[in-house]
């Protein structure tokens, strides 16, 4: 990074992958803006990142006004953004067959996973374009579901496929402004969202089977590597997964 002081915004920072990435960035010397719906959870992440400079901004990423307020607070506190880890997401509708999926549930998945990611990326892009030195990096949290679906996951899978298009478009449009964009596709990291996988989850052949998981810290180390590259280099897509999860050969 060009700036000696490196500033990262992490959405969904109150738990799971977001918290793990925030702590790994803190350990690597980054200053952090932590965003998420729950103020208490953000404060817990900040406390765990003791020694790092942190800013907690409760944010609903589906709200343009709240996203604007988040990046305004970051600008006021730090003066710039070097990295956005675009991580906030929901598995809304997971486990529901397509014919039974409620419109409201579909909209929730699209609003959080796609529109929320776009709003945060747009705000970060604007800041990175305007700041001096110009540029920065956006890292989108995709998923194995950006490649292949699970049964009964149409809303989540559709939004994660769309995330890949968002990543590619941001990469292209960011070139003139030294804005890099990459995507990390994560499979079976051990978080609150994946607890059910170890008890047994629906497979493509209709059976229930437990699936292996990996430590979320292994994902976080990859994000830190992506974040720390000079802007002349970019990890466009990375897949980090539990080694023996049923991805290769799924379906």
Image (cartoon, rainbow, N blue to C red):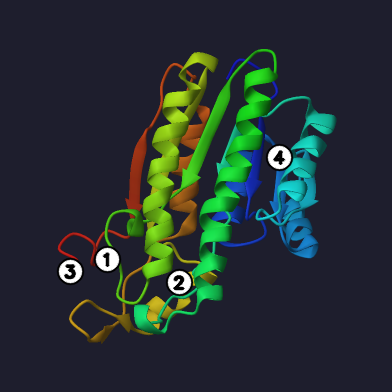
Whether residue 29 is visible here, answered yes or no, is no
Mark 2 against mark 3, which lies toward the viewer? Answer: 3
Task: Classify 10 Å Cα crowding around label 2: few (below 14), some (14-19), many (20 and above).
Answer: some
- Tag 4 or tag 1, which sits nearer the N-term? 4
User: What x and y, as percent, mark residue 44?
Assistant: 75, 60
Cβ–Cβ under 8 Å for marks 1 and 4: no
Residue pointed to by mark 2? 194
For the residues marked 3 and 4, what is the alpha-carbon distance in whole angstroms?
Answer: 40 Å
For the residues marked 1 and 3, what is the alpha-carbon distance in whole angstroms?
Answer: 13 Å
Looking at the image, is 205 positioned above or below residue 241? below
User: What x and y, as percent, mark residue 54?
Assistant: 77, 42
Residue at image position (41%, 21%) is 233
- Tag 3 or tag 1, which sits nearer the N-term? 1
Residue at image position (51%, 75%) is 103
Residue pointed to by mark 4? 32
Residue pointed to by mark 3? 251
User: What x and y, as percent, mark residue 241?
Assistant: 33, 56
- Tag 1 or tag 2, which sits nearer the N-term? 2
Frontmost residue, 29 versus 33: 33
For the residues marked 1 and 4, what is the alpha-carbon distance in whole angstroms?
Answer: 32 Å
Element under disc 1: loop
Q: Which mark is residue 245?
A: 1
For the residues marked 2 and 1, what is the alpha-carbon distance in whole angstroms?
Answer: 12 Å
């Amino acid at each position: 990074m060009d700036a000696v002081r490196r500033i990262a915004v992490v959405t969904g920072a109150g738990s799971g992958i977001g918290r793990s990435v925030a702590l790994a960035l803190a350990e690597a010397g980054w200053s952090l803006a932590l965003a998420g719906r729950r103020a208490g959870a953000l404060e817990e992440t900040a406390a765990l990142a003791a020694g790092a400079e942190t800013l907690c901004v409760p944010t609903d990423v589906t709200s343009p006004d709240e996203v604007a307020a988040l990046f305004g607070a970051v600008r006021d506190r730090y003066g710039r953004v070097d990295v956005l880890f675009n991580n906030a997401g929901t598995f809304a509708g997971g486990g529901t067959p397509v014919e039974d999926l409620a419109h409201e549930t579909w909209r929730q998945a699209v609003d959080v996973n796609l529109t929320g990611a776009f709003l945060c990326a747009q705000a970060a892009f604007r800041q990175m374009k305007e700041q001096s030195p110009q540029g920065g990096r956006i890292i989108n949290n995709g998923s194995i579901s950006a490649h292949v679906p699970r049964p009964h996951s149409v809303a989540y899978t559709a939004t994660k496929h769309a995330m890949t298009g968002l990543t590619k478009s941001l990469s292209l449009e960011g070139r003139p402004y030294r804005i890099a964009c990459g995507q990390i596709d994560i499979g079976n990291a051990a978080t609150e969202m994946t607890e059910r996988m170890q008890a047994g989850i629906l497979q493509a052949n209709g059976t229930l089977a437990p699936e292996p998981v990996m430590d979320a810290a292994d994902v976080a180390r990859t994000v830190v590597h992506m974040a720390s590259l000079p802007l002349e280099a970019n990890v466009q897509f990375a897949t980090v997964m539990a080694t023996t999860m049923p991805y290769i050969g799924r379906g």
